[in-house]
Image: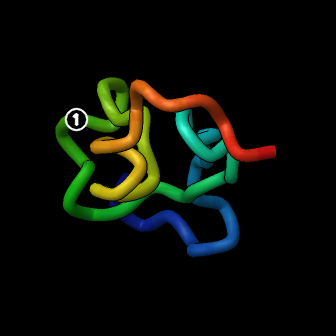
Amino acid sequence: MKGVKKQHLPEKTCATCGRPFAWRKKWERVWDEVKFCSDRCRMMKGRARAD
C-alpha cells in the first residue's frame, strides 16, 4: 500500500452496520481479515443490522 493516495484507498463494507470504511495503516498486515469498521461494530456482530 506504500505510495497510494488517500482517494484511492481500498474500501470494504462493515458486516454489522453496512457502512463503507477505508483501509487504515494499522490494518496493513490483516486487511483481508478485517470485517468491521470499529470496535463497537465488532462487539455488536451478533445483532441484526440497524437499517
Which residue is depicted at the point 58% across and 56% down? 21
Quarter occupied by residue 40: bottom left
User: Circle 1 is placed at which residue position?
Assistant: 30
Q: Which residue appears farthest toward the right when viewing the image?
A: 51
In the rendered image, the quadrant that contains the C terminus is top right
Which residue is depicted at the point 39% across and 41% down? 44
Amino acid at circle 1: Val
Residue nearer the viewer, 12 or 3: 12
SS state under label 1? loop
Which residue is depicted at the point 50% across and 64% down? 4
Left or right of 16 in this view: 19:
right
How many tags in the picture?
A: 1
Q: Which residue appears farthest toward the bottom when viewing the image?
A: 6
Residue 14, given in percent of the width and then of the height, sits at 56, 41
Residue 36, given in percent of the width and then of the height, sits at 42, 42
Residue nearer the viewer, 28 or 47: 47
Q: Residues within 10 Å of mark 1 (few under 14, many from 20)?
A: few
Q: Is residue 27 above or below residue 48?
A: below
Which residue is depicted at the point 34% across and 60% down? 2
Residue 34, given in percent of the width and then of the height, sits at 35, 35
Residue nearer the viewer, 49 or 24: 49
Residue 33, given in percent of the width and then of the height, sits at 30, 26
How is the rendered protein coloured?
rainbow
Left or right of 22 in this view: 38:
left
